[in-house]
Image (tube, grey):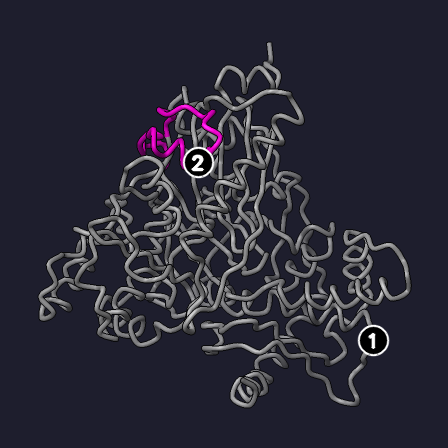
Amino acid sequence: MKSDPKSTIEQGKAILGIEFGSTRIKAVLIDGENKPIAQGCHDWENQLADGLWTYSIEAIWYGLQDCYANLRANVRELYGIEIESLAAIGISAMMHGYMPFGKDEAILAPFRTWRNTNTGKAAAELSELFVYNIPLRWSISHLYQAILDGEEHVKDIDYLTTLAGYIHWQLTGSKVLGVGDASGMLPIDPATKDYSAEMVAKFDNLVAPKAYPWKLLDIMPKVLSAGEDAGRLTEEGAKRLDVSGHLKAGIPFCPPEGDAGTGMVATNAVLQRTGNVSAGTSSFSMIVLEKELSKPYEMIDMVTTPDGSLVAMVHCNNCTSDLNAWVGLFKEYQQLLGIPVNMDQVYGLLYNNALNGDPDCGGLLSYNYFSGEPITGLAEGRPLFVRSASDKFNLANFMRANIYAAVCVLKIGNDILFNEEKVEVDRITGHGGLFKTKGVGQRLLAAALNSPISVMETAGEGGAWGIALLASYLVNNEKGLSLAGFLNDSVFLGDAGTEIAPVPEDVEGFNVYIENYKRGLAIERAAVEAKA
């Protein structure tokens, strides 16, 4: 007999997943059948301080506590009870970045997020040393850039981790990291599912003349795969998470993961020859490979699934922020007319109208660069809309151009995988804000990648649900299944979602658009130089 949500929570059998996204911290509570039964959230924004994107330690803890309090309120409202205990907890967050700590557990430099692009010299030198693409946002790039810049704090580092790793450590006392998130700190050896011993040795030799009191492995988190025990909630951790004091200590945690890994889980894309596209504030595609690529590519990051399979990742710093800003203008116009605003309706009308536009957007171009975009060689960005007097400027083409812009950089990276490396994929699943208006973002992404795109009803649950599923895998995998087997058997039960195949006219039009877009990058570079 199925247990109802109230008794699941009362018996301490519910599972909690919390994910720190770029603009929202979200908590999802799931039952024994892995279905969401309550949720909480907290909105937040990064700050530009001394030229670097960051979130303060105070904002991290306030956000976590407020998100959990919001979840508690939702549970009280729905079921009239308090959360006293849980079966398991999982923490995930934006991948990569730089959080160095001293022996006293105080942070030595402000948290540097994935969004920063100040690490170009370090990333280039390490890519050459390792013969492996090391992206700007990876932790090892940030560490080496701090060394190159002669930052005083480097000698005092006792522990270096990611945002998810930091929160997990403070709640459990365990200095560990899921292999997917760890693969964004330093490359992982697929054979050992641990940091590459060869690259660790190369890095230690590189910085040996500095005579730091640490070696690289001394300061890095221990790598764990999905399903491994990652510690338990301490008394102090329970108080930090639930300031009301109701939550009891001793709850097991799954390995903390990055948002890329939880996106793979939430879309059932951890098996080889599957992939997913996450499209929100930033975007990335993840294709799980059958074998290593023939050579390193600057546009493609090699990471892993939460259970250690090799993944080709194309990461774009910008996706829907500029698109949302334009939609905000139409909202203001509606308000001026005195018409009540329903944002779902505004998005729905504008997005669907984009499908009436010319496949090549009538010559219009949009650059959605709120920040720099490494794949196209921009260290900074300026949102930009471009047209000539002879282009077909109407609302449908305008909206289509802005939706195209949200996935243009993604296409540039994936063209390498599909056209040059001949990577084969059976299914790509989309999730994130771009797909909220049914069928539109999905169809236009299918055109960009020239591949069928599936969207599941559950994809809207996002990464918080994904990390909750990883916590469920830790405690509910009685059959001893692989992660892919557990997801198929216990979560998705054969649900592959709704698929849209690419429309030939859309594909042809997008190919024209992307060539115009590449030529127009010179305009974007000029805008960066001309406008502070």
| Disc assigned to residue 241 | 2
Q: Is residue 243 above or below residue 153?
A: above
Give how far apart the Cα atoms at labels 2 and 1 are.
Answer: 50 Å
What residue would you read off at disc 1? 394
Q: Main secondary structure of the magenta part?
A: loop
Quarter holding the N terminus is top right
**Foreground: disc 2 or disc 1:** 2
For residue 496, which quarter of the picture?
Answer: top right
What secondary structure is marked by label 1?
loop
Residue located 46% across and 58% down the image: 423
- Residue ID at (48%, 46%): 62
Q: Position of residue 20 (x, y in %)?
A: 49, 48
Answer with left or right where residue 450 lies relative to residue 150. right
Q: Nearer the viewer, residue 520 or 331?
A: 331
Q: Where residue 348 appears, x then y in whole percent?
A: 79, 55
Q: In terms of image quadrants, where is residue 110? A: bottom left
User: Magenta span covers which residues?
Assistant: 226-252
At 77% from the left and 54% from the top, the residue drawn is: 343
Amino acid type at image mark 2: Leu
Instruction: From the viewer's perspective, tell me whether residue 329 is left or right of residue 380.
Output: right
- Quadrant containing the C terminus in the rendered view: bottom right
- Please state which amino acid type lies under the numbered disc 1: Asn
Which mark is first along the chain, 1 or 2?
Answer: 2
Mark 2 Cα shell of 10 Å, populated few (<14), some (14-19), many (≥20): many
Identify whether 52 is placed above or below 470.
Answer: below
